[in-house]
Image (cartoon, grey):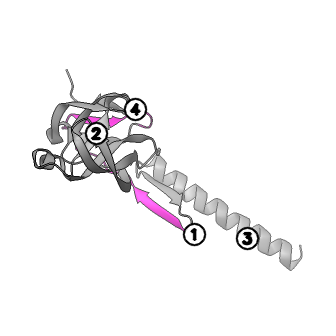
Amino acid sequence: MNTSQTDRRNSSIGAQSTQEAANVGHANGQSSSSSSSGSGNMVKTFQAYLPPTNRTYSCVHCRAHLASHDELISKSFQGSQGRAYLFNSVVNVACGQAEERVLLTGLHAVADIYCECCKTPLGWKYEHAFESSQKYKEGKYIIELAHMIKENGWD
């Protein structure tokens, strides 16, 4: 084997070992996912798990935890695909760029939110409410029912 063949083989073995290590982490319940950014760098994100004693809402597509029932503020919201819930806080969610939108309750600055694990659009985050009666929504999250399921302790 010449030097260039040896270098390629060693490089291939290193890449395989890295992938095997990642697979072992997933098998042991150490959930993490990697995604690449536009610059080619790898960014590792870790999935958050809510306590198993809590009733939780999870992503219908990948089952990642999204919110605890304790964080639910209201069930009387309307999303673009039907009913939606308003939450005080969420986990495993990424936010897009904020933009102004006219919603049923007036003008708001909102950012679309996505499941951090499977990238499914879930709803939006209220960044700013322009009407004083809507200020309570600022910093809160809307998740559409079409994108979540109930898990842990629901009767």
Q: Crowdedness of circle 3 by 10 Å Cα count: few (<14), some, many (20+)?
A: few
The mark that comes first in sequence, 4 or 2, is 4
| Residue 82 location, quadrant | top left
Describe the element under mark 4 as helix, strand or loop: loop
In the rendered view, does 10 fall on the left or right side of 29? right
- Observer-side mark, 4 or 2, equals 2
Label whose residue precedes the other's in the sequence (1 or 3) = 3
Question: What residue did someone put label 1 on?
Answer: 39
What secondary structure is the stretch in magenta mostly built from? loop
Q: Is residue 113 left or right of residue 55?
A: right
Left or right: where 18 falls relative to 109 = right
Q: Quadrant of residue 36?
A: bottom right
- State the image coordinates of residue 26 (x, y, percent, origin top left): 47, 49
- Residue, x 16% and y 34% (percent of image)? 74
What's the residue type where badge 2 is placed? Leu
Mark 4 and 2 residues: CB-CB less than 8 Å, in contact? no
Foreground: disc 1 or disc 3 = 1
Crowding around mark 1 (Cα neighbors within 10 Å: few <14, some 14 to 19, many 20+) is few
Task: Identify the disc placed on residue 60.
Answer: 4
Q: Find disc 2 in the rendering and name its residue.
A: 103
Question: Percent x, y for residue 98?
Answer: 35, 55
Provide residue 9's location: percent of width, then percent of height: 77, 67
Residue range in magenta is: 39-62
Q: CA distance from mark 1 to mark 4?
A: 31 Å
Q: Residue furthest bottom?
A: 3
Tell me if label 1 and label 2 are in contact, CB under 8 Å.
Answer: no
Give the residue type that dot 4 points to. Answer: Val
User: Reading the chain from its start, which is encountered first: label 1 or label 2?
Assistant: 1
Residue at image point 59% right, 56% down: 20
